[in-house]
Structures are given as C-alpha cells and as structure tokens.
Image (tube, rainbow, N blue to C red):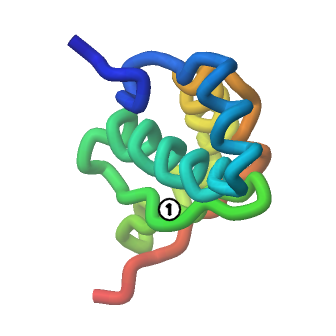
Amino acid sequence: MPTSSSPDRPLRPDVFRSLRRRGLLSGVEAAWVLAVANTIAKQRFRAVTFRDGTLICVAGSLPAAELQLGSGQFREAVNKKLGRDLVQKIRFKARSE
C-alpha cells in the first residue's frame, strides 16, 4: 500500500501546507519529482536534479538528442503523475562516457 510520500499517488493538500510552513516544501517537491521521473524513465535515462521548474536528465549522447524532441510528452506524463504542474522544462544532457 503506497504511503503519502510514494510517487504512486499525489500528496494530500494538508501535507503541502505543513511542509510549506516549515520551509521544507521545495526539497520534498524536488525529491518527489525525481522519484516520479525515474519511475517513468524505466532505465532509459536518469533524472538527476530538479530546481526552479527545470528537470535535468542524463542519457547517452544519441538518446539525449532524441529524448529532447519528446520531452514535452515526458513532462506531461510526470506532471500528470504528480497531480500538479511542477515541471515546466526538461533538459537532457549527454552522459560523458
């Protein structure tokens, strides 16, 4: 059974209010976005950071270029899973191998 912090279901509004009061909301949102993004990515790439609405993901050089073209669909999938429009932009970087 998923807990309230599980990426499988959105957090309750009272949880957001409590975290905002304590100044912890941005860190929790970042961790939550990364967990959801990595779940959706399914080993194709790795979400590494989220800040100011921008999600940074790392992939091989050829997949990174291809993934950037489909980033709008991935952004919509992440936001839908989160239940909020937290991710505004996604950048894919090529992994140095």
Look at the numbered disc 1 and give the secondary structure of its residue: strand
In the image, 91: left or right of 57? right
Work out whether residue 28 or residue 79 is closer to the camera in this orientation and state it. Answer: 28
**Residue sitting at x 66%, y 21%:** 14
The residue that label 1 is drawn on is 57
**Residue 57 vertical placement versus 86 (above, below):** below
Viewer-side residue, 61 vs 51 = 51
Q: Position of residue 23 (x, y in %)?
A: 71, 56
Q: Residue at x 27, y 40 (%)?
A: 42
Q: Does residue 94 sit above or below 43 in this rendering?
A: below
Kindly give the residue lying farthest to the top in the view shown: 1
Q: Residue at x 57, y 26 (%)?
A: 82
Residue 58 or residue 79, whichever sits in front: 79
Q: Position of residue 50 (x, y in %)?
A: 61, 60
Q: Position of residue 72 (x, y in %)?
A: 69, 37
4 or 30, nearer to the observer: 4
Which quadrant does the N terminus fall into?
top left
Q: Considering only vertical position in the picture, is 11 above or below 67?
A: above
Give, as a three-letter code, the residue at label 1.
Cys
